[in-house]
Each structure stands twice: as C-alpha cells, then as structure tokens.
Image (cartoon, rainbow, N blue to C red):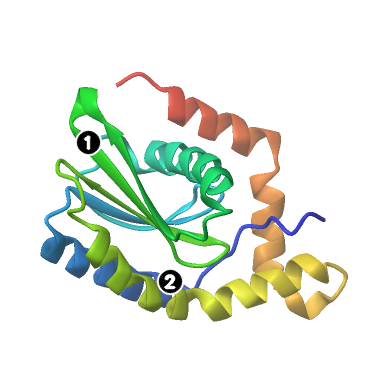
C-alpha cells in the first residue's frame, strides 16, 4: 500500500474544527477558508467559495500537489496562486504531510496570517485520527484497527451502485 488513505474523523472533533474555521474566517477578511486532506477531502470549510466545496477540494488538491513539487526544494510552507480573470487569490499553507489550509480572497495576503494561526489547532485536532487511520492502513489484517462500521463504509464506498449514485448526483443539472 502506498500510504494513501482516507481518515475517518470523530464527528465531535470535526464540529470543533468547523467552529474554529468559522471563527478564523470571520477574523480574516477572506471569502472562504478550507481545511483539506491532500486527496482533496474537505474536512472543514467556512465562507462563500467560488465553487461547490467538493469541487474546490478537488481543484485545490491538484494545485497543491503541483506547487508542492515546485516548492519542495525551498522548504516553503506557504504559497499563493493568483487568478486574475476572477480577481481571486488562493493562499495555501501546509499543516503537515496530510493536511493543508486554503484561504480564498479577492486581495493578496488577506488570509495567510489567519491560516498560520489556525494550522496548529487543525493539526492537533486531527493527529490522533490520522494516526489511527495510518495504523489501519499499514495493518489491514488486524481486526482492532478498523472497526466493523469502517469496514461497512469501505464496502459501500467501493460498490458500483454507490459510485454511480454519487456520479449522478455530481453531474446532475440544476
């Protein structure tokens, strides 16, 4: 296994994280703030993003992966991407090897300080969940690392009917 996995996080932890992101959002002047897994899974978001959060997560993960390749030799933890046609600035901050924060604003450097303040909280809130997920990913044969409910979820997520229903939902015309 490559070490890539999806972490399932306790609902209470996610709610606390969501509240923290909402609070940070209101203090930042940004249009929206996201906490994302590098796979593009949105763990928390607040504000008015220019796209649906799921679409923003997928787009942000691609941009983040590409820019991390470019910036990995410099050791930088932050970078911004300007989209002049839409007058948008995407400000990225690496939280750890699995998580990053994204601030979206109409002015440069609006959200970066807020993201820096939010990063330690996000990392602390999710560390234990990520450690459990990593243990489950590296020890799939141990019954105690993946509860039955996670096994059921994994089965559901890989079923053709579930995938088809989600694709239909995603591409449904409004």
SS for dot 2: helix
Q: Residues within 10 Å of mark 1 (few under 14, many from 20)?
A: some
The mark found on residue 126 in the picture is none
The residue closer to the viewer here, 21 or 84, is: 84
Give the side of residue 64 with respect to residue 46, left or right.
right
Local SS, label 1: strand
Number of numbered discs overlaid on the protein picture = 2
| Residue at 53% across, 29% down | 167
Residue 11 sits in quarter: bottom left
Q: Earlier in the sequence, mark 2 or mark 1?
A: 2
| Image quarter (top left, top right, bottom left or bottom right) of the C terminus | top left
Position of the N terminus, as image quadrant, is: bottom right
In the picture shown, does residue 46 fall above or below 143? above
Residue placed most toward the observer, 53 or 103: 103
- For this orientation, the residue located farthest to the front is 74
Given this view, does label 2 or label 1 mark the residue nearer the observer?
1
Q: Position of residue 138 (x, y in %)?
A: 80, 68
Other residues around mark 2 within 10 Å, as few (<14) / some (14–19) / many (≥20)? few
Which residue is label 1 attached to?
Answer: 88
Q: Is residue 107 left or right of residue 163?
A: left
Q: Residue at x 23, y 66 (%)?
A: 114
Task: Find residue 33 and report its horizontal and vertical position in percent.
Answer: 27, 55
Q: Nearer the viewer, residue 158 or 51?
A: 51
Q: Residue at x 45, y 81 (%)?
A: 124
Quadrant in the rendering for residue 36: bottom left
């Amino acid at each position: 296994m490559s070490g890539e996995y999806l972490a399932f996080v306790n609902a209470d932890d996610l709610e606390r994280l969501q509240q923290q992101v909402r609070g940070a959002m209101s203090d930042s002047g940004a249009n929206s703030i996201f906490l994302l897994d590098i796979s593009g899974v949105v763990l928390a978001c607040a504000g008015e993003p220019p796209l649906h959060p799921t679409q923003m997560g997928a787009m942000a993960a691609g941009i983040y992966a590409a820019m991390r390749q470019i910036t990995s030799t410099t050791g930088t933890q932050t970078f911004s991407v300007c989209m002049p046609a839409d007058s948008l600035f995407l400000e990225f901050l690496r939280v750890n090897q699995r998580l990053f924060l994204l601030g979206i604003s109409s002015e440069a450097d609006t959200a970066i300080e807020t993201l820096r303040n939010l990063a330690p909280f996000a990392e602390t809130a999710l560390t234990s969940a990520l450690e459990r997920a990593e243990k489950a990913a590296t020890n799939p044969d141990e019954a105690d690392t993946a509860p039955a409910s996670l096994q059921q979820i994994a089965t559901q997520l890989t079923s053709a009917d579930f995938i088809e229903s989600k694709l239909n939902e995603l591409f449904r015309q409004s």
